[in-house]
Image (cartoon, grey):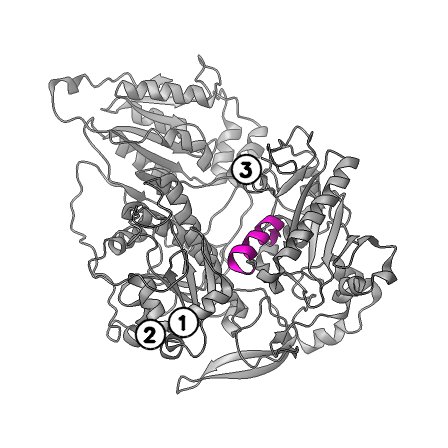
């Protein structure tokens, strides 16, 4: 711990004393954290103390708990502190953020300098306090940057300053150096990089495409007026604000989109503020969560638009969100705040939104007031009937998609095709499930609610069969007649290759039919035009007249290529495949995966004809899914008796390559010669793989399992334990053989991993769940 040598003796004579500051520095080794502290403390008029874990124990490296204790001691003496650690993820920062309170503000200064600069500094420096220097520094810095999680206000920060280069860092130094003992700084984000700029993680560059912004409805024709601009003539107080620096240079490595694709109404979600009205959730906290959720969502998806709607022109939540969204530099053409009736956006505002969200109650019943009553009244009784078919109740933090019947007035008048019911946390003691002002739990539930809402919205967008969505939101599914002709003459070895590369969209045609394109004529009516090419769709289409094989009830039925029927044939005729089968009953078959991706990899298959994949599962299939889950646990235990070092995970692929519902029971070593490419790995180690426990919960609560996009299969390769990135499969496998990091928390919880009771040193078994990791 280092003092700055300047105590605030001048304050003893009187005058109002300002808040003590806790400034958490966030940055990789070599980003300049220690230099930042030294430059501020050298000429500061406020007393500062630097807390550095590399030298906390009498000049030697210490522990985090020692840093917390020293920081607490300094704060008790009225000194502001710099937390000079890397603090690259939320967990590292959490204990220091807890210092915040009425008399203390917690700030973050993010030294987000170019990775090459950080690495160069780390390699070249000598005499570093933590001895991180020389050749090994490059690997350490790169690994740490790949795990970086940028801070957000909802962690508990009152102010976050981003420094993208050395000039920004110097501006921040000058700002904190100029702070007097009674000075304060404004809250919010400052200096943050635009959401649309490219981000480099570590040495490897992962570029994100940025779509062309859509046209907004003309204000002349829109009776739904957006909020007036906030007053911009407010003068700065004693604090000196950092101005955002805009770099107009185009990134030379940016990959432009092919063609100019404009957003349409079918890609727009209108939603109200969740839990801030009748549920009385704090508006400041809610607005932070809304802006963070919107920013993350729009960062991941280019071709969508979000509209936050409120009935009142004096809406406090709209005002807060609008200001904070501007501070975050969220594109105002992709995120709008509007005042008006959410059920009349098209007729009164010339803004077509095919999907709107409803702030529902837990019983999913009409009535009450506000948005829920308005949407049910506008949609008619058809919405309540359709909702009952999907779910009976809704738990806080979740949502459910309900297709609106075409007979609904809301469908006919506004063109709304889907309602997404979403339930947030309740802080109103007069309503059920009140959290009694537990905002730690409440904020988590509200974040989960928006995440569920936006994910369900994307599932609707991805299922629409339009030219724009097929180009931008899902991988390329079209193939030429010449390609089809060539594929029709493939050899047996080619078929084997197909089986191994199971998730290549170009080689796996699970849905076949003539591709249709929605076009609008001059009269704004919609017609379907066939292109005459074959395609497969990742989700069941909601567009009429798409040619598919008809089943007995008239609904579109997916068709499968001959090679994808192998599992179905085995299940229907197990007597013909005795050598391949481990266990058979009237309802299930268990067999080894022909191309295992781990030391142990078996499939538990349902024998119910017509149940082809997880998308076909409904609530009536819940007992069957539970039996499959139990059968998977049974075989996991059997293998663990043979090799107690193994760890197993049970789950389903969102869009399987093989027909017949099957549960994967796979060991997490991934030691297999058949694990050959990125799609093999990502099919088991991204959200594309739905854990059996999660699928069971979805079906029980929502009536069906949520599915995730095949785009996840093209993500970068990351270790499933430490999340480090790797350029190719051989290097990933090399790393896997040596990685001993603990499994991520989301896998460890809820019985998603299964290990022996006396498992390896890497895992610990929970009490009461003999097969669940904690």
In what quadrant of the picture does the C terminus appear?
A: top right
Residue 251 vertical position relative to residue 474 in the rendered view, above or below: above
Q: Residue at image x 82%, y 64%?
A: 573
Assign a secondary structure to mark 2: helix
Assign a secondary structure to mark 1: helix
As drawn, is 633 to the left or to the right of 35?
right
Q: Position of residue 497 (x, y in %)?
A: 77, 60
Residue that carries the numbered disc 3 in the rendered image? 142
Asked which quadrant contains residue 103, the reply is top left
Alpha carbon of mark 3 to alpha carbon of mark 2: how far? 49 Å
> Is 697 inside the magenta-drawn segment?
yes
Residue that carries the numbered disc 2 in the rendered image? 346
Task: Give the magenta part as a residue range.
Answer: 689-704
Which of 301/232 is in front? Answer: 301
Query: What numbered label is drawn on residue 265?
Result: 1
Whether residue 216 is visible, yes or no, is: no
Assign a secondary structure to mark 3: helix
Alpha carbon of mark 1 to alpha carbon of mark 2: how far? 10 Å
Main SS of the magenta segment?
Answer: helix
Q: Position of residue 745 (x, y in %)?
A: 54, 39
Assess whether mark 2 and mark 1 are in contact (beta carbons under 8 angstroms): yes
Number of disc labels: 3
Name which of mark 1 and mark 2 comes first in the sequence: 1
């Amino acid at each position: 711990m280092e003092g700055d040598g300047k105590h605030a003796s001048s304050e003893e004579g009187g005058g109002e004393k300002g808040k003590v500051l806790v400034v958490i520095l966030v940055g990789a080794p070599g980003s300049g954290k220690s230099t930042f502290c030294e430059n501020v403390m050298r000429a500061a008029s406020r007393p500062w103390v630097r807390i550095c874990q590399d030298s906390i124990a009498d000049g030697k490296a210490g522990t985090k708990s020692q840093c917390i204790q020293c920081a607490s001691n300094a704060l008790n003496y009225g000194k502001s502190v710099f937390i000079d650690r890397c603090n690259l993820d939320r967990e590292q920062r959490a204990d220091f953020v807890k210092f915040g309170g009425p008399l203390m503000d917690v700030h973050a200064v993010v030294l987000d300098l170019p990775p090459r600069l950080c690495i160069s500094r780390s390699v070249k420096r000598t005499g570093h306090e933590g001895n991180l220097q020389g050749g090994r520094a490059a690997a350490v810095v790169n690994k740490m940057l790949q795990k970086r999680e940028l801070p957000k206000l909802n962690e508990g920060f009152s102010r976050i300053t981003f420094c993208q280069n050395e000039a920004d860092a110097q501006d921040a130094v000058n700002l904190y150096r100029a702070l007097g003992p009674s000075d304060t700084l404004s809250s919010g984000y400052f200096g943050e990089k635009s959401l649309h700029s490219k981000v480099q993680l570590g040495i490897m560059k992962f570029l994100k495409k940025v779509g062309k912004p859509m046209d907004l409805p003309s204000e002349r024709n829109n009776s739904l007026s957006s909020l007036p601009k906030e007053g911009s003539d407010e003068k700065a107080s004693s604090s000196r604000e950092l101005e955002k620096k805009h770099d107009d240079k185009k990134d030379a490595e940016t990959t432009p989109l092919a063609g100019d694709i404009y957003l349409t109404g079918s890609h727009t979600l209108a939603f109200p503020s969740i839990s801030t009205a009748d549920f009385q959730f704090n508006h400041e906290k809610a607005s932070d969560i809304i802006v963070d959720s919107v920013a993350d969502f729009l960062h991941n998806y280019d071709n969508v638009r979000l509209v936050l709607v409120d009935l009142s022109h004096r809406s406090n939540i709209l005002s807060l969100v609008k200001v904070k969204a501007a501070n975050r530099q969220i594109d105002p053409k992709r995120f709008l705040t509007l005042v008006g009736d959410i059920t009349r956006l098209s007729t009164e505002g010339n803004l077509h939104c095919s999907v709107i969200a409803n702030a529902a109650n837990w019983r999913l019943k009409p009535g009450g007031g506000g948005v829920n009553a308005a949407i049910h009244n506008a949609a008619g009784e058809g919405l309540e009937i359709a909702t009952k078919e999907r779910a009976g109740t809704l738990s806080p933090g979740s949502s459910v998609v309900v297709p609106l019947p075409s007979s609904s007035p809301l469908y006919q008048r506004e063109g709304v095709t889907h309602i997404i019911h979403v339930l947030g946390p309740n802080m109103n003691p007069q309503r059920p499930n009140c959290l009694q002002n537990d905002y730690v739990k409440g904020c988590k539930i509200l974040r989960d609610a928006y995440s569920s809402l936006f994910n369900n919205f994307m599932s609707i967008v991805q299922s629409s069969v339009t030219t724009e969505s097929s180009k931008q939101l899902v991988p390329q599914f079209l193939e030429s007649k010449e390609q089809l002709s060539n594929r029709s003459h493939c050899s047996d070895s080619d078929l084997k290759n197909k089986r191994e590369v199971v998730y290549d969209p170009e080689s796996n045609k699970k849905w076949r039919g003539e591709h249709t394109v929605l076009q609008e004529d001059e009269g704004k009516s919609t017609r379907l035009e066939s292109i005459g090419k074959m395609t497969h769709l990742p989700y069941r289409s909601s567009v009429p007249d798409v040619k598919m094989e008809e089943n007995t009830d008239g609904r579109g039925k997916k068709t499968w290529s001959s090679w994808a029927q192998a599992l179905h044939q085995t299940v229907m005729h197990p007597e013909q495949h005795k050598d391949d089968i481990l266990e058979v009953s009237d309802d299930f078959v268990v067999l080894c995966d022909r191309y295992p991706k781990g030391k142990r990899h078996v499939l538990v298959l349902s024998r119910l004809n017509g149940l082809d994949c997880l998308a076909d599962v409904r609530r009536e299939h819940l007992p069957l899914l539970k039996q499959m889950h139990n059968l998977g646990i049974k075989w996991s235990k059997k293998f663990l008796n043979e090799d107690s070092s193994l760890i197993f995970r049970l789950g389903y692929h969102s869009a399987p390559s093989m027909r017949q519902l099957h549960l994967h029971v796979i060991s997490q070593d991934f030691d297999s010669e058949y694990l050959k490419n990125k799609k093999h790995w990502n099919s088991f180690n991204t959200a594309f793989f739905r854990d059996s426990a999660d699928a069971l919960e979805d079906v029980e609560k929502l009536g069906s399992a949520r599915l995730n996009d095949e785009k996840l299969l093209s993500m970068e390769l990351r270790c499933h334990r430490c999340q480090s990135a790797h350029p190719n499969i051989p290097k990933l496998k090399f790393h896997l053989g040596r990685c001993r990091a603990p499994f991520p928390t989301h896998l460890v919880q809820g019985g998603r991993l299964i290990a022996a009771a006396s498992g390896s040193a890497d895992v610990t078994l929970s009490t009461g769940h003999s097969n669940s990791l904690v």
